[in-house]
Image: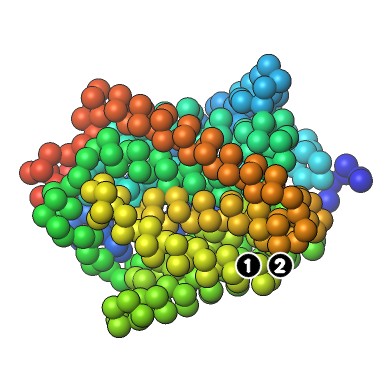
Amino acid sequence: MSTGLNTGASAWLMTSTAMVLLMTPGLAFFYGGMVRSKNLLTMLYMSFICISLITVVWFLYGYGIAFGRDAGGLGLIGWGDWRLGHVGPDALQGMIPKQLYACFQLTFAIITVALISGSIAGRARFGPWMLFATLWTTIVYLPIAHWVFASTGWLNKWGVMDFAGGLVVELNSGISGLALALVLGRGVEFRRGHGPRPDNVPFVLLGLGLLWFGWFGFNAGSALSDGALATRAFVSTMIAGCAGMLTWRLIEWLRIRHLTRLGSASGALAGLVAITPSCAFVSVEGAFAIGVIAAAVCTYAVELKLVAGYDDTLDVTGIHGAGGVVGVLSLGFFATGWDQGSAGLFYGGSATVLGKQAVAVLAVGAYAFTATYLIGTVVDRLTRMRMTDEEQALGTDARFTEG
C-alpha cells in the first residue's frame, strides 16, 4: 500500500473532524434542553468549555499518552511525543497528515468528557468541573484510548473490535458518569421524587439533529478514507439510529399508551451509541437488529436509577453505558468478518470473539469506574464540587452574570 498523501482520504477526514467537533455543541443543546431553565446556561457551557480545555491538554501531552510509543511493551500507556508543535502539516501517518489524525482523535476526547456532565446536571460547581475534566482526561480517557485505538494497545493487539469508540467513548463515559453521580450523591429534585423536566424540547431535538449529523463523521470518519469501509459505517449509522427511534416509540406505546418526543430522541441516541463500535463490522440487517436491541435495553436501563437510587440525571449511564455494552457485545454475534475483524457467532465465528468483547467491557468498565470515583472524591473534597441544597434550589446559572 502506498504511503504517499491520499488527498481524497485527507479531505474526508478533515470533513469528519469538523463534523465530530460539531457534536459537542449538539450535546450542549441536547443536555441544555433537558434541564430546568435555571440550569440551562451552565449545562451548555459545561460542554463548550471542554472544547478549549481538552484541546490544550491534548496537544501538550494527551496525544503522546494515547498514541505515543508504547511504554514497556505492555500496551497500557503511550510515552513520548508530548506535544505536536514539532510536527509539520506535511508529516504523514499512513496516507493522511499526522496533524489531521491527531485533531480527529481530539474531537473524540472532547465529547467523551462532555458526556459525563449529564450525570451531574444541576448539582456540580463549574470550577471543580473543569479540574475534574482535566484530571479525568489524563488518568482515564488517555490510557483507555491507548488500549483500544493505538496499534500497540493491549486490547487492540488482542483482537478486540471497537471501530469508532463503543469502549473508549460510550461505555467509558457511561460508567464514569455513574461513578461521579455516586460521588456527588442525589440532587434535591431527585430526593423529592422529581425527575429532570425538559424545559426546552426544541433544544433537545436540535441537539439530536446535530449529534446525528456529526455521528456520520464519528463512525464513517474512523475508516480514515472515503472507500467501502466508510460507506458501510455510514449506512449502518443511519439504519441503527432510525431503528432505535422507532423501537423506543413502540415500547413507550405498549407500556404507557403515550408517545413522547424525548423518548424518540433517546431511542435514536441509543441506536447511534450501540452501532458505534460495530458500524463497519456488521451488515445492514445486523445494524437494524442492534438498533432495536439497544433501544429495548436502554428503555429499561434508564429506570435502574429509580430502583437503585442513584441520580444519573440525564441518563448517561442508562443510554451511553448500557448502549455501549450492547454495541460491543453485539459484535460477538453480528460481526460478518468482512474486510477486517473476526466473524461473530451468527456468521460462523468462535465464541472466543464474544469472550474477548466481554473481557474488554469488564476491563474498561472496572478501570473507568474505579479511577473516576477516586478522582471525583479527591476533587470534591479539595474544591467542593457538589453544590449545596440551597445552591441547587437557586440553580447553577445563579453564578453566571453574562447574558
Q: Which residue is mark 2?
A: 283
Q: Please state which amino acid type lies under the numbered disc 1.
A: Ala
Q: Residues within 10 Å of mark 2 (few under 14, many from 20)?
A: some
Task: Tell me the residue at 15%/54% (across/down).
Answer: 189
| Disc assigned to residue 107 | none
Label disc, if present, on residue 287 of the rendered structure = 1
Q: Is residue 333 left or right of residue 366?
A: right
Figure check: 45 above or below 298? above
**Secondary structure under badge 1?**
helix
Residue 35 found in image quarter: bottom left
Quadrant location, the C terminus? bottom left
**Disc 1 residue crowd, few under 14, some 14–19, many 20+, Cα 10 Å:** many
User: Which x, y percent locates residue 319?
Assistant: 42, 57
Q: Is residue 25 left or right of residue 12?
A: left
Q: Could you say which is closer to the camera, residue 287 or residue 330?
A: 330
- Point 81% across, 41% down: residue: 94
Quarter of the view holding residue 131? top left
Q: Residue at the spot x=61%, y=25% of the render?
A: 77
Q: Tell me the element at label 2.
A: loop
Location of residue 374 in the rendering, given as x and y in whole percent from the top left corner: 35, 27
Q: Residue at x 40, y 40 (%)?
A: 176
Along the horizontal axis of the image, is 389 left or right of 273?
Answer: left
Do residues under tags 1 and 2 come within 8 Å of each other at their CB atoms?
Answer: yes
Compared to residue 235, the image places residue 361 above or below, namely above
Extreme residue toward the left, this view: 390
Q: Is residue 183 above or below residue 240?
A: above
**Residue 250: x, y in percent?**
42, 79
Q: Is residue 74 above or below residue 177?
A: above
